[in-house]
Image: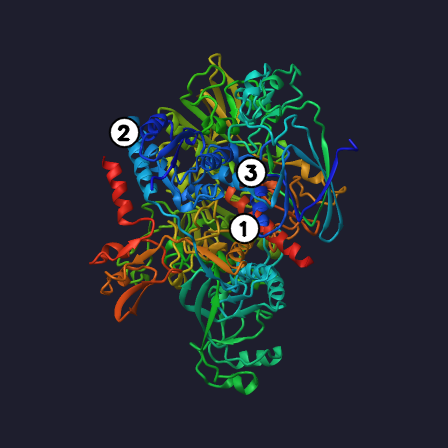
Amino acid sequence: MAENIETASYDALVIGAGIAGGEAALNLANNGFKVLLVEKDLSIGGKMILLSKVFPTLDCSACITTPKVSEISRHPGIKIFTGTEVKKIQKKSENNFEAIVVKAPRYVIEEDCTGCQLCEQACPVVVRDQYQYNLVGRKAAFIPFSIASPRVAAIDIENCTLCGACEKVCPTKCIDFTMEAVEHHVNIGTVIVATGFRLFDPLKIPRYGYGLYKNVLTSMEMERQLAPTRPFNTVLRPGDGKVPDKLAYVLCTGSRDATVGNPICSQICCMYSIKQAQLLMGALPMADVTIYYLNIRSFGKGFEEFYEQAKGMGVNFVKGKIGKITEKENGNLILRYEDINESVVKESEHDMVILSVGVMPNPDAGGFFGEGELKLDPFSFVHQTDLLGSPPETSIRGVFVAGTASGPMDIPDSILSAGAASSEAISYLNRKQ
Amino acid sequence: MNKKLGVYICHCGGNISDYVDVEKVREAVRDEEGVCLAKTTMFACSDASQKEMIEDIRQNNLDGMVVASCSPKLHLVTFRAVSERAELNKYNYVHANIREQVSWAHSDDKAGATEKAIGIVKSAIAKVRLAEALNPIKIHSEKAVAVIGGGVAGLRAAIELSNMGSPVTLIEREHFVGGRVSQWDVMFTTNQTGKELVTRLYNDLISRDNVTLLTGAEVISNTGSIGDFTLKVKITPRYIRARCDEGYLQKAIDVCPVVVPDEFNFNITNRKAIYHNFPSEYPQYPVIDIKNCTRCGECEKVCGIIDFSQKEEIVEIRVGSVLMATGFDPYTPYPGEFGYHQFEEVITLPQFKRLTELNYKKLIYKGKEIKNIAYIYCVGSRQIEGEVHTVASADDLSKDTGSNQIEGENRYCSRYCCTSVIHTSIDAKRKFGNISNFHFTRGIRTYGKQELLYAESLRLGDIYLQSYENDPPLVYRENGRTHVKINDILTGRREISVTADLVVLVTGMVPRADNSVATLFKLPKGRDNFFNEIHMKLRPVETVIDGITICGACQGPKNITESMNSALSAATKTFSYVSKGEIELEPIIAEVDKELCKWCGECQKACPFDAVKMETSEGKEIAVINNSVCKGCGMCLPVCPVNAIDLIAFSDNEIESMINALVS
């Protein structure tokens, strides 16, 4: 690896190219700073680029994200590394950080790939497509998704059989199996941590039967079924391909639940579930949609009105916690729950159940710096040291946090948080001069 | 000249192509005059499509481009930028909306939608044939900025702008800074007090050379536009010359014979006509409330810094951009709403917060010690349509309503109140001991990590009850005591009644009652009457008035962290307007034909932006348009009796050709 080291200097390192990291990078670059934007995934855009529509305006998410992504990727002040992880960051002095980032081999020369997809057609290996949340398959030589940026192929080397079919068809000869990881040593003046969140893993609640019953989905799987680039072009039960007509949402799956170690509220699930329910009413006009909730938390601008709108459209809201889900022979699901309104335990049958999974911290952030340097809160989100005075500040001067890396928040709040982080970063960089 | 045109029709990933046959649209327009390239695309706005367009423009030497996709509100700027990058003047790009105006509007009629889309694309092609290359209007921009509102959001934004290098004038209407937060004691989650936070921000602010702080100051007029606003600010004197010794000041306060309700404490206490809200309030000069002062002169005798000769002042400032941080008002319940102004034990959350701060050891209100407290949530928030409050006494009504039935119009959730009241109730329990809290809720909304506070409250033994919107709790008197009754859905709709020493109405946030400053700037408001941003996600701190940004609770309910984030974001945006010293404006403005114009003044009357002036040119009175103020709205065009005004890029010729293309 020693020969694969490159060095460079930037004003700022932004870690994570989701909507928060992207917004922060753009703000910095628009103010004349040089930014290195590092993304672990193969495309920038984070989770937002994969969503269907966004609450409460019902804007098409891709339509809002793609131009931003395009602006980020062509900005002369921003260098983007995808497929890249931060190995170590060391603070030498104020305005002087040294970071080591490792770019994993993509096995495709990005500059030469035209995105023609011939390699995809030639590849004989089919695996589950993580960008469609495993609803459909993809090849081992693949373009992550149609609106990915960069929209170039990658080789999934773990599943690749090295048959060479892709190499043969590639018109620009851009597939290179000899590619190796490259370590970049970069000097930077400030760091923005925008590592985002992970979704709660519903396997941790076995009584809900996720992974066991085919018609129990996560909300992100439903999000993909409703997205413009959806796999089936309609909503289908994964179990038998039937169009569902009695759907249930289970709110607070993995949130507000000390038994799974996450007592806090995820802040977005009520709203995205209400949004999906509204979209389902449009996609499947005859379907019944029931949302089982503890409290509906529609607290943001226009959110309460959005909730009222869903009620008006006929979405059924039931106050009650789901205790257990069981499967019938025909794939339908029986939900056992306490109907708090009537103070009785009830059972109801649905043909599709969506678990509204919550927001979990991304544990990566803690590992970038020396042991304990970047303090985390009790839940492993990045700790904000001056929450009321300067929300982006962290335990390291010159390192700022943006978006859901510091805790659950929705898209508008993430964008404002990113604006704040870039603002603080600019002030920090200016103080040097 | 025959233009070479490129046309792109977007699927929008199904948003359009599910209802419009985009291939049929392509076929229908590809042979239109001038069209040398017509393509369909999955997402026209995606990076890959943008690159393809640039290549097409360059390879085919296109002179004009049309993208038929979503609303121009979303992507006009995107595709103009594409044509610029391909060295095609961006005004040779025309946007056709076949999503909001076609596919979404006619999802029940695919054939009709396709036909309409064809018409719209054809008319865009007709327009682009006549389009001319234009250059943006460049104007000089002042580097200085004004921040209106000296609450925590305004203070934070001013500090950040100063950091970035803009001279800042912070204009605060009150005589003291800190806004609502200075009225708060300990706060979630840090248990820092509001006063500590304000102190820190104030000290940071006044240590800066490039910041001017005006208190007792109100903007009374605004002229100009982005890059060059001229604000007239009226400054009310304090009638105090200098900072003074606390002892002398206290004497002056003691001798003042005037006693008025103290608004800072929401009228639960009284103050004198010479006052400060609390010792060490910033700036640390007291003030004389001249409206209530009787000029008896007693204070002058004991304190030498008083100066009744001070006069109201009007100052003029010129700035390139204005940041609005005017904050909120707490909702004021109607007399009789949950017993407010009807039973003396009923107070609001802001009053309760002042009460807990001002009391020590024991919680006393109106001479009685408080033990049982009932909190009624969502007062003035989440009001449902048709929810009517009967006002206690007809005399209490403002005259313009004319009825004693009032329907609340605040549909929104005020976001901060659940956390705020739970934190205050825990604080009261800790501070005074021996307190029982009963929460009459509509469902607790302690979102995010604030959930921990709710859990703590439950551990401390607070009782939570809940009702639905249409069955609110009832406050009533019985046997000389005040009670709150609820049909509690958490215990199977059991009727539960609590005897309360104090009833706290958890009132939400409403827009400022006196919002005249918004009228001066013509700021748009949303359905909730708070100021509206352009786009919640794409442009969250900008307004449709160029050069004006908004942040904090004037935009909608926010907690302090959220206000700070928006303040910092708005500061960066404001700075980006002025930092280059030059601003580019749209050249799509009205144009007067000097020959035809006979100055009748109709256009001046019609202009909502004061962009039209009368001038004498070659001995003739004519209308002249101020290029930096005109927004190209077109209001002046139809009122001109001699048709002397045209709108650049929307000339009669262009519009007629579009109509012809639509009907052909």
**Residue at mark 2 to residue at mark 3: CA–CA distance:** 44 Å
In this view, B655 is above or below B268 = above
* Left or right position of A227 against B199: left
Residue A266 badge:
3
Note whether residue B363 is visible: no
Residue B562 badge:
1
Measured as percent of width and height from the top left, residue B88 is found at 44, 43
Q: Amino acid at mark 2?
A: Gly
* Left or right position of A235 against A217: left
Residue B112 badge:
2
- The chain carrying label 2 is B
In this view, A186 is above or below B229 = above
Q: Residues within 10 Å of mark 2 (few under 14, many from 20)?
A: some
- The chain carrying label 3 is A
Q: Amino acid at mark 1?
A: Glu
**Residue at mark 3 to residue at mark 1: CA–CA distance:** 16 Å
Secondary structure of the residue carrying tag 3 is: loop
Q: Amino acid at mark 3?
A: Ser
Measured as percent of width and height from the top left, residue A245 is found at 40, 22
